């Protein structure tokens, strides 16, 4: 899997297709998607055109998509995967992930009432995982993994799965370094993919908290930016790559898409990058609180506590 990819969460209708087309043109080979992002139907034609016009071969592309929370029942896994394949105009995914360890009723896209959730354990995740393993055997995806799994939840899955998870895609940046998770994944050949590596400043206001700390404007990051001649975003991406994690910054702006891609070519002093290790706050920008309202069977401690 290419270590630097294009994230597509928050890419609005009318923007995602152009962003993917431009990203492939400048050299990206890793595109991160999900049906809940509501843009896979737009992205599909960009992928198909790039392949048909020999801009890139299918074998050189790495396309990830995810299983949304209303399709955890094993009988719903294959139909959900096939919908993404149809929308993305692909015969297979390179990586298929469980998006969240949270389950909804099948007819609910996003719950507004407590009764629209399924209780934790009502559909054991190992059963969902078993259905995903079958998708690998059917050739509909090359690898499978998870998103937003805590360390204990990842350990449980790893110890019981027939095909071990290849990836855990989680929020990672200098304010949320997740060192125990990093060490465990190193030891067990699980790749960590960092989402929101820049602090996701463009996410909807409803998902923001008051007085959030800014990554891009932190004095140390600005200092390293000035010293190295890199943008603050490039400094953060270099830090993520130096930790041997994959990283999927989102942008729809051509100049930023290129700037982000060039991060893998930058040479920033390793001691300078390591100085960012002192910034850890265990702070989540995307903490899943939207699943944990009054009456919900999910709580933040159940999501993240180990």
Image: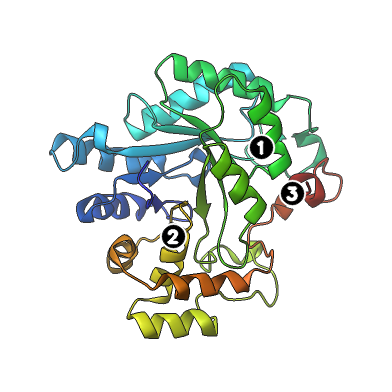
The earlier-in-sequence mark between 1 and 3 is: 1
Front position among marks 3 and 2: 2
- Estimate the x, y position of residue 21 in percent, counting from the top left: 25, 50
Image: 305 above or below 165: below
Residue 194, image x, y percentages: 51, 53
Query: Which type of secondary structure does the marked residue at label 1 adopt?
Result: helix
Q: Position of residue 231 (x, y in %)?
A: 37, 76
Task: Answer whether labels 1 and 2 touch (C-beta < 8 Å).
Answer: no
Q: In this view, does 210 lie above or below 10?
A: below
Q: Which of marks 1 and 2 is in front?
A: 2
- Label 2: few (<14), some or many (≥20) within 10 Å? some
Query: Which of the marked residues, 3 or 2, is nearer the chain's N terminus?
Result: 2
Q: In this view, does 306 lie to the left or right of 27?
A: right
> Which percent across, then down, holds residue 205?
61, 67
How would you rate the neighbour count of disc 3 (Cα within 10 Å): few for under 14, some for 14-19, many for 20 or more?
some
Find residue 242 and name its label: 2
Report how far apart the C-alphas of labels 1 and 3 lie in the structure.
11 Å
Seen from this angle, which residue lies furthest right? 295
Q: Which of marks 1 and 3 is in front?
A: 1
SS for tag 2? helix
Gap between marks 1 and 2 measured at Cα: 23 Å
Instruction: Report whether residue 163 is seen.
Output: yes
x 39%, y 30%: residue: 93
Between 120 and 167, the one nearer to me in the picture: 167
**Quadrant position of residue 130:** top right
**Which residue is labeled 1 in the image?**
154
Q: Which residue is drawn at 78% across and 25% down?
A: 122
Q: Is mark 3 on a helix, strand or loop?
A: helix
Q: Position of 126 compared to 57: left or right?
A: right
Reading the image, the residue beneath label 3 is 304
């Amino acid at each position: 899997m290419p270590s630097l990819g294009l994230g597509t969460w928050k890419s609005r209708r009318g923007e995602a297709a152009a962003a993917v087309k431009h990203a492939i043109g400048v050299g990206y080979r890793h595109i991160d998607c999900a049906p809940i992002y509501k843009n896979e139907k737009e992205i599909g034609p960009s992928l198909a055109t790039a392949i048909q016009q020999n801009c890139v071969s299918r074998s050189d592309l790495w396309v990830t998509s995810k299983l949304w929370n209303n399709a955890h029942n094993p009988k719903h896994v294959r139909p959900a995967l096939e919908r993404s394949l149809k929308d993305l105009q692909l015969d297979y995914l390179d990586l298929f992930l469980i998006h969240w360890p949270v389950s909804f009723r099948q007819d609910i896209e996003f719950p507004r009432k407590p009764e629209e959730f399924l209780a934790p354990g009502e559909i054991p995740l190992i059963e969902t995982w078993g259905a995903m393993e079958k998708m690998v055997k059917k050739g509909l995806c090359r690898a499978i993994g998870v998103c937003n799994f805590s360390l204990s939840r990842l350990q449980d899955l790893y110890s019981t799965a027939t095909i071990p998870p290849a990836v855990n895609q989680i929020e990672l940046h200098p304010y949320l370094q997740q060192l125990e998770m990093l060490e465990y994944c190193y030891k067990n050949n699980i790749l960590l993919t960092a989402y929101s590596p820049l602090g996701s400043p463009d996410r909807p206001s409803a998902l923001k908290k008051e007085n959030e700390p800014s990554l891009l404007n932190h004095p140390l990051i600005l200092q390293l930016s000035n010293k190295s001649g890199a943008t603050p975003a490039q400094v953060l991406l270099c830090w993520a790559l130096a930790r041997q994690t994959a990283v999927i910054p989102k942008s729809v702006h051509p100049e930023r898409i290129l700037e982000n891609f060039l991060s893998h070519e930058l040479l920033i002093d390793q001691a300078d990058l390591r100085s960012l290790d002192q910034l850890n706050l265990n702070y989540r920008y995307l903490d899943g609180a939207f699943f944990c309202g009054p009456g919900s069977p999910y709580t933040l401690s159940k999501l993240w506590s180990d």
